[in-house]
Amino acid sequence: MTERFTGNFTQQEPIPDAGIEAALSVLRHGRLHRYNVAAGELSETALLEQEFAAATGARFALAVASGGYALGCALRAVGVGPGDRVLTNAFTLAPVPGAIASVGAVPVFVEVTESLVIDLDDLAAKLDGARALMLSHMRGHLCDMDRLMALCDAAGVVVIEDCAHTMGAAWDGVPSGRHGAVGCYSTQTYKHMNSGEGGFLVTDDEEIAARAVILSGSYMLYERHLAAPGPEVFERVKYHTPNVSGRMDNLRAAILRPQLALLDDQVRRWNERYRVVEDGLRDTPGLTVVERHEKETYVGSSLQFLLLDWAPEMVQEALARCADRGVELKWFGGAEPVAFTSRYDSWRYADSVPMPASDRILAGIVDMRLPLTFSLEDCAQIARIVRAEVSAVWQQG
């Protein structure tokens, strides 16, 4: 009998009991707004920021309404403005070029490699005249951060890291988000901590941090932050920084604090599942496993493989066959954007030129989520199904 997977690729684990109790406490006292505290009370949001700064080793942290807000806030805080050229990966998600366009800057796309990371040779060729690089660690893949930072530092290009998929990851022992001037994270439901929507911004630069706090809607209440610079830094920037409200509320912060305490164990569990699927897919005819660099500590909350140089109709047939057996796969090779699988040429607000090398890779990227609600046995079954259906289509071709 042909086996069929019956799990749900979008079902996350429940919020920890400690998070539920903390959320109920906030609901009972009603002080949801980030600055609404009782006498002597420290807000959930301020405490979460302090704990996240400690977890990443950053001097300063700001909890915000979404990962996308963190990206836009970071651009404004480092001084990017209308007409500035901001580099980013050709393989990323819409909030990244969207954040760049939202401040009036010009997205400039950089090639991607078969390792699904930014092409550092192409980056080197495009650094001249760029104001910043918004580096997307897309789907949790980290490039050679040592070489990247050397290139950008030499060119005077500010690096903002999009760590939506790399919370808990590291390059050569340094946490993701801690190489560039700013690291931005997401706590959207499908990320590594779940508040529905939410995010963080971290930095060691006191003026960037102060601008970000004021941008997030501090209403000059910045003394209530626990992971922010001193009042003298705010005095230097407060009259010249606009309010673009977006700091996280106390309810979401309460849900996230217990999850942050569990993050290391969650990373371990994701990677167990990732390795089971990865091992099951190795040596599948026509399928390329994306190899990881030895310096990379990753978080396997999703898995990508390549069907390089396959005809589009063959890829679609393989995905349809897997779907018939309960395995939900997404493809970045479609001509039209579908859900989150848009590409650099989908974003018509951002001018682009054809990138044949990246187009070939994007046309072969197949993507799947690996929620922690899957058991290791589930992951082995998923790998068997994908292996069987990809092999069958490959043999037909």
Image: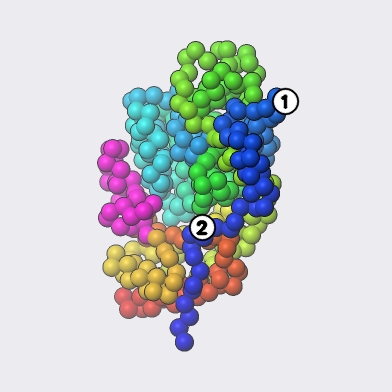
Q: Residue at x 67, y 34 (%)?
A: 47
Compared to residue 209, the image places residue 87 above or below, namely: below
Compared to residue 293, the image places residue 46 above or below, namely: above
Dot in front, 2 or 1: 1
Inspect the image, locate mark 2, and give the three-letter code of the amino acid beneath it: Ser
- The image position of residue 17, as x and y in percent, is 67, 52
Real-space Cα distance between discs 2 and 1? 42 Å
- The image position of residue 209, as x and y in percent, is 57, 25
| Label number found at residue 20 | none
Q: Nearer the viewer, residue 144 or 4?
A: 4
Q: Which residue is mark 1?
A: 40
- Could you tell which of marks 2 and 1 lies nearer the N-terminus? 1
Q: Which stretch did the figure color magenta?
A: 331-358
Q: Secondary structure at mark 1?
A: loop
Q: Most prominent secondary structure in the magenta stretch?
A: loop
Q: Which residue is mark 2?
A: 302
**Residue 341 colored magenta?**
yes
Q: Is 354 displayed left or right of 150 in the figure?
A: left
User: Seen from this angle, which residue lies furthest front?
Assistant: 28
Inspect the image, locate mark 1, and give the three-letter code of the amino acid beneath it: Gly
